[in-house]
Amino acid sequence: MHINNLPVEILEQVFESIPLKDASNIMRVNKQWYQEYRAVIYRQKDVMFEEILYSSWDEWNVSPNLIPNYNYYNFLISKLRSFCDNFDIFYLRLKLQNIYKSLEIESKKIDKEREEINKLMADYEASPDFEGWFPDWLWEGMHKNNHHKSVINYGNIGRVVKLRERLRDWTIENFVQSLELP
């Protein structure tokens, strides 16, 4: 069997283990390899971007006390902008907007799920078998899981909103500074 006849899924797994420094060699083999490896690279970029986006001070091994008048959102913006510059993602604002939209869609799904869970709980509570406790599959499996997803989702939305505001302010400040005479 020729290597080009391998299923796409196997090629993707092979390509995921190849370092980016060898990307140009892999992408020059043929059109199929180019397309598949490029897709792997874009997925990896998105994962890395989101890792930076949702990171904390602890993960950077940077003490906030070492950087005076520097808050975490400014720190994150500088890291995200640097990432975008290095990985050829041109617009940080557009990337944050897309993530915000996907988080809003996820939020709507979570809210619909919450409505269904509330209906189940109300039906169960109204049943004659109800003894004051919900079954574990409903309480632990559905109710708490939905609440946990909701908290994480709204926290992520808040972070993205704050970063978008800070990016806008930062862009305005940089523009004004560029207009000032030396």
Image (tube, rainbow, N blue to C red):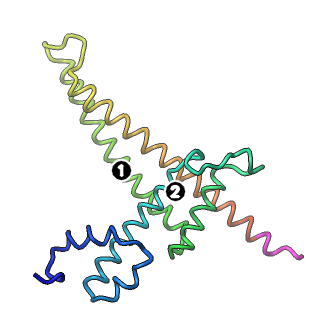
At label 2, counting other C-alpha atoms closer than 10 Å, the crowd grade (few under 14, some 14-19, many 20 or more) is some
Could you say which quadrant of the image residue 15 lies in? bottom left
Is there CB contact under 8 Å for labels 1 and 2?
A: no
Label 1 – label 2 distance at C-alpha = 20 Å
Question: Looking at the image, is 64 positioned above or below residue 48?
Answer: above
Residue that label 2 marks: 52
- Please report the residue visible at 43 percent of the width from the left and 42 percent of the height from the top: 152
Question: Looking at the image, is 161 positioned above or below residue 18?
Answer: above
Residue that label 1 marks: 106
Residue 91: percent from the left, percent from the top? 54, 71
Image quarter in which the N terminus is found: bottom left
- Please report the residue visible at 46 percent of the width from the left and 57 percent of the height from the top: 50
Q: Magenta segment range?
A: 176-182
Q: Is residue 134 left or right of residue 26?
A: left
Magenta stretch containing residue 181, yes or no? yes
Residue 15 versus residue 151: which sits nearer the camera? 15
